[in-house]
Image (cartoon, grey):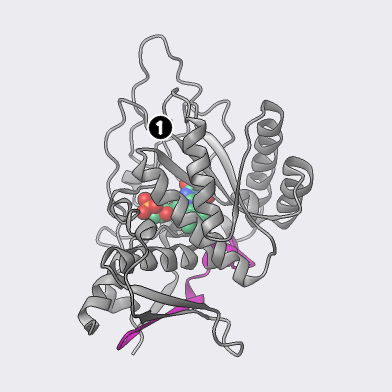
Amino acid sequence: MTQLTDLAEVVERALRAPSVHNTQPWLWRIRPGVVELYADWTRQLAATDPDRRDLILSCGAALHHLQVSLAARGLAARVERLPDPEDPGHLATITLRPGTGDTADAALFPGIDRRRTERRRMSHRPVPTRHLRTLAEQASRAGAVLLPVSSPAMRQRLATALTEAARTQAHTPGYGAELQLWTRRHARGRDGIPANNLPPHLVGLLSSPPLRHFPAGQLRQPRHLPGQGPADDAAELLVIATPGDEQSDRLRAGEATSAILLAATGLGLATTPLSQALEVQTIRQTLQQEVLHIPEHPQLILRIGWPATTATELPLTPRRDLRSVLLR
Ligand SMILES: Cc1cc2nc3c(=O)[nH]c(=O)nc-3n(C[C@H](O)[C@H](O)[C@H](O)COP(=O)(O)O)c2cc1C
């Protein structure tokens, strides 16, 4: 029988999931043969993420990390999403069942420790179409779609939407304070984004849609190779979308995010989740109706490309330890 200690180790791997501003907005309960996942609403970014989309996406990513960790241990499990209609914070119950783990999920496991959010300039080398197809398959296994924003006209419209979202948020009371709060944790802090993971300023991205403007950090941009300008890279922009926009769709989008990020990491690609354009309701609508022209609901943008050849390895971001996120 699987021991509680085994499940504790599996949950510990799930804590490596990405989350908005590294808020880690999750709580877990471990019982014999069962793991429960809850949202930690106290970690919501009220100004940045008023409708809790990023929070649920982050928990969905942790849920998928958990499934990957179980599969890598050869354990099969049944996942019930939102099992309690009376408690929207109870996001999933994962119950071990007889059988062996899903091999496709298990194959993603090495990505858990290798994945990082890359905010620096990426390489000028294009991402092969077959890799984009692999990532789209990962999205569809998780119940979402992955749409490339490839034509110059679409990219331009997306860039405009992102700039507009940044402008709106700059005037949203509390938005700037949340940025400061989550990027200026004390030295031994176990959450938030350390300065070592943030570039000093956004050079080298002049013709790419703007990344979120975090307070300046200490992460150096890679040197650009002779003959290549600093201004551009060949990173792809892809949008994760779901058929609906209920909490269950956002949870699925989070699971898809994890699946895509881990698969991309396995291929040697660098990744950046970009949620700004989805955090502002009017911009989200613009994205759906005027940029992408899709019936599905956009949930998150991913920037994916080869890391620059001269880029140094990114440091790991911290995580709270298991004790701090366990419910009795
Ligand atoms: C839902 C979601 C939204 C995010 N939005 C952004 C964003 O807009 N800009 C950004 O640079 N990083 C974004 N991130 C990445 C987080 O900041 C990152 O996962 C966190 O700091 C932990 O670092 P790591 O991914 O390197 O482990 C987002 C992540 C998630 C899951």
Identify whether 73 is placed above or below 93.
Answer: above
Instruction: Identify the residue at horizontal 37%, vertical 32% (top origin).
Output: 307
Q: Is residue 138 left or right of residue 326?
A: right
- 31 lies above or below 115: below
Instruction: Identify whether 145 is placed above or below 56.
Output: above
Side of 280 where 6 appears, left or right: left
Q: Quadrant of the N terminus?
A: bottom left
Query: Picture coordinates of residue 221 (x, y %)?
Result: 37, 30
- Say whether residue 184 is visible: no
Q: Amino acid at mark 1?
A: Trp
Measuring 74% from the left and 49% from the top, which residue is drawn there? 288
Image x and y of residue 78, in percent: 44, 77
Q: Where in the figure is residue 46, as x and y percent of width and height?
A: 58, 67
| Element type where label 1 sits in the image | loop
**Does residue 97 appear to the left or right of 285 in the view shown?**
left
- The stretch in magenta equals 30-55
Side of 155 relative to 55 (left or right): right
Circle 1 residue: 306
Is the C terminus in the top left, top right, bottom left or bottom right quadrant?
bottom left
